[in-house]
Image (tube, rainbow, N blue to C red):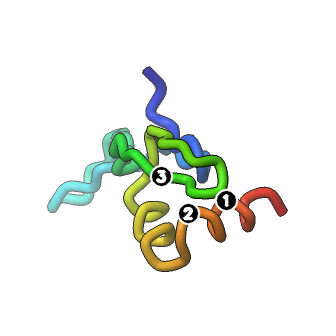
């Protein structure tokens, strides 16, 4: 299963792990993904998505309908 947010498209990126002695080794920065169920009242249905926690915070603030409307633009 891919580590990609279904709504925002966030995916893992690479960078450097920097030690105290300033040595650099490659590492991955993975998004914080969670499975979450949302109820969409317009369609009268529940939808389960794999979503980043930053998107969950935005949905809690705006509401699922407004968030999906903004994504469509």
The secondary element bearing badge 1 is classed as helix
Residue drawn at (54%, 77%) of the image = 62
Residue under numbered circle 3:
39
Q: Image quarter for residue 54?
A: bottom left
Residue under numbered circle 1:
68
**Residue situated furthest right in the rendering:** 73
Q: Quadrant of the C terminus?
A: bottom right
Q: Position of residue 50 (x, y in %)?
A: 44, 40
Is 27 located above or below residue 62 in the figure?
above
Q: Badge 1 local density, few (<14 within 10 Å), some, or many (20+)?
A: some
Is 59 located above or below residue 47 in the figure?
below
Residue 50 located left or right of residue 18: right
Q: Quadrant of the N terminus?
A: top left
Q: Position of residue 43 (x, y in %)?
A: 64, 48
**Residue situated furthest front in the rendering:** 44
Q: CA distance from mark 3 to mark 1?
A: 12 Å
Between 9 and 19, the one lying in front of the other is 9
- The answer to whether the residues at label 2 and label 1 have Cβ atoms under 8 Å apart is yes
What label does residue 32 carry, if any?
Answer: none
Q: Position of residue 20 (x, y in %)?
A: 15, 61
Residue drawn at (56%, 53%) of the image = 40
> Which mark is first along the chain, 2 or 3?
3
The secondary element bearing badge 2 is classed as helix
Residue under numbered circle 2:
64
Q: Badge 3 local density, few (<14 within 10 Å), some, or many (20+)?
A: few
The secondary element bearing badge 3 is classed as strand
Q: CA distance from mark 2 to mark 1?
A: 6 Å
């Amino acid at each position: 299963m891919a580590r990609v947010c279904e709504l925002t498209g966030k995916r893992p990126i690479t960078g450097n792990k920097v030690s105290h002695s300033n040595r650099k080794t490659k590492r991955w920065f993975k998004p914080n993904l969670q499975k979450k169920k949302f109820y969409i009242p317009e369609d009268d249905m529940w939808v389960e998505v794999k979503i980043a926690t930053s998107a969950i915070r935005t949905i809690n603030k705006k509401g699922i309908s407004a968030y999906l409307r903004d994504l469509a633009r």
